[in-house]
Image (cartoon, rainbow, N blue to C red):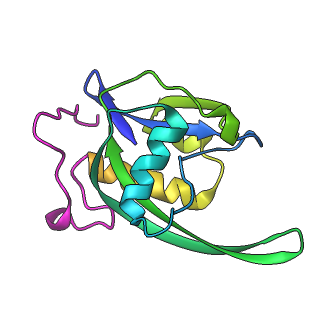
Amino acid sequence: MYRVHDGEPLFLLIRDSYANWGFPKGHLETDEAPDVAALREVREETGLDDVTMDGAIDTIDWFFRFRGRLVHKVCHFYLMRSDASETTPQRAEGITACRWAPFDEAAKLVSYANARDVLARAHAMVRGEDPLGDPAQAPRPRAGVSLRPRP
């Protein structure tokens, strides 16, 4: 999730009940497509209603142990945009804060390496670059989005 403020993209991070910074995410409802679930979860967890989908960023999956059991997790990440700035963290779901941050600050705040990779890809997409390095394949920002060039 990003918004443009004074020509600069700001990325939305959430802090969970363990004080980890990352991105809104959740579970698919029955027969729900991943992109639909992503929009729903962002709206629920952040209180932002004005959210539009710009495109897919990545799908990551990993394994971890929880209470002695091996868990396989799959997350679909999408680049979304909002013109709104005011958020309302969903405290009932353990979201303790929402924060808009420029890329460099967001990259330092994000708690997990795989989330930093997603953030880097999102940043490349917002700047009109291919997240995997091929400028010819890059999605372009929507019309009317003005971003300052990097120094």
Q: Is residue 113 above or below residue 6?
A: below
Q: Nearer the viewer, residue 78 or 124?
A: 78
Residue for point 25% across, 46% down = 127
- Kindly indicate the quadrant of the structure image that contains residue 83: top left
**Can residue 56 be seen in this snapshot?**
yes
Magenta stretch encompasses residue 129: yes
Q: Is residue 42 above or below residue 88?
A: below
Residue for point 66% across, 48% down = 111
Q: Position of residue 108 (x, y in %)?
A: 59, 41
Q: Position of residue 15 (x, y in %)?
A: 65, 38
Q: Nearer the viewer, residue 48 or 125?
A: 48
The quadrant the C terminus occupies is: top left
The quadrant the N terminus occupies is: top left
Most prominent secondary structure in the magenta stretch?
A: loop
Q: How many marks?
A: 0
Magenta stretch in the rendered image: 127-151
Residue at the limit of the structure toward the left, as seen here: 143
Q: Nearer the viewer, residue 128 or 93?
A: 93
Q: Nearer the viewer, residue 134 or 65?
A: 65
Magenta stretch encompasses residue 130: yes
